[in-house]
Amino acid sequence: MIMRILGEGQYEITDDHLDRLNELDAALQSAADADDETAFTTALSALLDAVRSYGTPVPDATITPSDLVLPDEDTSLTEVRELLSDEGLIPG
């Protein structure tokens, strides 16, 4: 799976890490639902850090579609709330 962090780049994520990323995504969804800005900021940072840690950067010269697009760390709770589906940012 290819995940893009807006303004940063793409990362290839293996299926082995999707469960952990979904856990972090659930925490982000919960913080957004609770309108808890502090928990939201922490959860978004943790999710993006995990993508960076688990993922392999896709070279900039490689053009491939992203399966998922994640907001950058400066994205507000209001902006992310508009992106969230019933399954969070990461479906599954």
Image (cartoon, grey):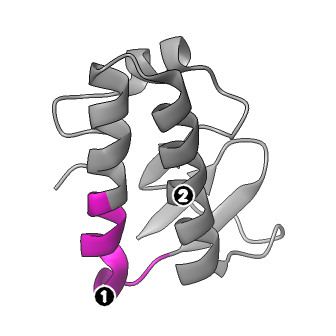
State the image coordinates of residue 38 (x, y, percent, origin top left).
55, 30
State the image coordinates of residue 53 (x, y, percent, origin top left).
61, 79
Q: Is residue 55 visible?
A: no
For discs 2 and 1, the disc positioned in front in the rendered view: 2
The C terminus sits in image quarter = bottom left
Which of the pair 69/50 is nearer the observer? 50
51 vs 58, left or right, is left
Question: Compared with residue 37, is residue 39 higher up or lower down, i.e. above or below?
Answer: below
Question: How many tags in the picture?
Answer: 2
Find out whether residue 20 is within the magenta segment: yes
Quadrant hosting residue 81: top left
Question: Compared with residue 17, is residue 10 higher up or lower down, i.e. above or below?
Answer: above
| Overall secondary structure of the magenta section | helix
The residue stretch that appears in magenta: 13-23
Which of the pair 2/90 is nearer the observer? 90
Question: Compared with residue 10, is residue 17 higher up or lower down, i.e. above or below?
Answer: below
Q: Which residue is mark 2?
A: 46
State the image coordinates of residue 21 (x, y, percent, origin top left).
36, 65
Which residue is pictured at 83% across the width and 70% down the height? 61
Q: Which residue is mark 1?
A: 16
Q: Amino acid under label 1? A: Asp
**Mark 1 burial class by Cα count in 10 Å: few <14, some 14-19, many 20+:** few
- Mark 2 vs mark 1: which is more N-terminal? 1
* Mark 2 residue element: helix
Q: Is residue 12 visible?
A: yes
* Mark 1 residue element: helix
Which residue is pictured at 27% across the width and 34% down the height? 30
Quadrant hosting residue 83: top left
